[in-house]
Amino acid sequence: MNLRSGRLKDKMTGDAAEFTSSLDFDRRIFKADIQCNLAHTTMLKEQGIISGDDADQILSALNELDDKGINELDMDPSVEDIHMAVENYVTSQVGEVAGFMHTGKSRNDQVATDLRLVLKEELRDIHLDLLNFISTLLDLADAHTETIMVGYTHLQHAQPTTFAHHLLSYAYALKRDYDRIKDAYKRVDMSPLGSAALTTTSFAIHRKRTAELLGFSSIVENSIDGVSSRDFMLETVSSLSILCTTLSKICEELIIWSTYEFGLVEIAGEYSSTSSIMPQKKNPDVAEIARAKCAGVFGELVAILTMLKSLPQSYNRDLQEVTPHLWNAVDNSHALLNIIADMLSTTKFNKERGVELAEANFSTATELADLMVREKKLPFRVAHQIVGRTVGKAIEEGLMPSDITPEYIDAVANELTGEKLKLDSELVKNALDPQQVIRNRKIIGGPAPEMVKEAIANLRNFVRGESR
Ligand code: ARG
């Protein structure tokens, strides 16, 4: 039975049909649409709304379609969407009885239900991708708890740390991304089925039963809300966008750190490209493409926000145009998580360069000031000034941190305060040694190897708990 044969006399033009059809991206909700129809028909039967015999015919046609697959369907754009294609298939198998399947149901609640069903699966996969990513970081961190590097603020040398400590900063950010997506999942996991077009139906349908049959944890209660709301998509894509800020930072750092100037990491050949003219080139193309694709996910978020803004309540066909942006964001997030984790796990960290940079540029100056506070009870601001002057002078004179002696410091201290500090030379040496500085930061969340190992163990527990 043609949907248009009632109210409308004319067929859509071929162009208009193609322009408005969602069949192309509806492929993604094919299985979910069958599940949705199975649940609804089962409920109609249980409630005595349609006869057991009619229901059984419909159910077996749906199950048959599930087995045979989407190629059984007529996917011509004039069919409009997957809901009609499935209904047409059932009609071709059982005749007019198929029409009972649509009792108390609309494509409006159906599409919202299908999308939520598929998105739930996708989010579960993204959870696994994220746990895998965090595990990759933990394996790398395990191997680098003693690997020294300089930490940056303003992209200028700041304080010494370890590669493991830095990697864990990503791991904790990704853990929060994981939590956010898991939280968004709760709002995806709600059934709008039974909202029908917008005001439910006078048939005695059982919404909680279809929700249960489809594995939803709860229902979207208000029926207008049920067909209108796509905030579950927004929440998903905003969580994915936040995740992509994390991922893009990782890519950015790999790109910068692999430059000749930094020389901190070497990205594997498998994740690099060369130039068609400059034979010496090794370019971090995968990281660059990933960095840009992260931006693409933000674009999907803005597209969805903009389409939903000011849309009148209930179903508007605009909602159909939102869907491909959701899938783009989801697909790109999957791809990004997998490729970046693989690239990271094959990236080599240059330990010698890490030490060289940490030792070169007074990244241990804070510890020297702390030493003055600890040993000589100087107020930190005074110590800060003495060390600042000392470092400035040393840089002017071309000295390295290892050249700084208590006497050198005292020349400055005397000038500023009229007093000498007479620091112990062994203590000064240790304060200026990146390795000692790192060892002494045994604060929770700090870089001391034992603290980092504890953090790794905690995160491993988290991953194990979530993988069950
Ligand atoms: N294909 C539509 C969508 O993706 C669902 C069908 C609702 N169509 C309608 N004309 N009310 O949103």
Image: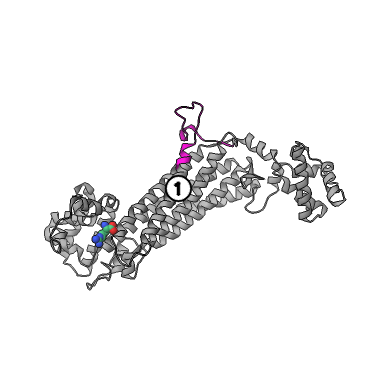
Under mark 1, the amino acid is: Cys
Q: Residues within 10 Å of mark 1 (few under 14, many from 20)?
A: many
Asked whether 283 falls inside the magenta stretch, the response is yes
Which of the image's four quarters has the N terminus?
Answer: bottom left
Q: Quadrant of ligand 1?
A: bottom left
Residue drawn at point x = 55 percent, y = 36 percent: 258
Asked whether 430 falls inside the magenta stretch, the response is no
Can you say whether 219 is above or below 337 in the image? below
Residue 69 makes an appearance in the image = no
Horizontal side, residue 410 vs residue 384: left or right: right
Secondary structure of the residue carrying numbered label 1: helix
Residue at label 1? Answer: 294
Position in image of residue 264 (x %, y %): 59, 37
Position in image of residue 421 (x %, y %): 85, 48
Residue found farthest to the top: 279
Position in image of residue 168 (x %, y %): 57, 48
Horizontal side, residue 402 vs residue 116: left or right: right
Residue 257 sits in which quadrant? top right
Horizontal side, residue 217 vs residue 380: left or right: left
Position in image of residue 97 (x %, y %): 13, 61
Q: Which residues are magenta?
A: 264-289
Could you tell me how many numbered marks the image carries? 1
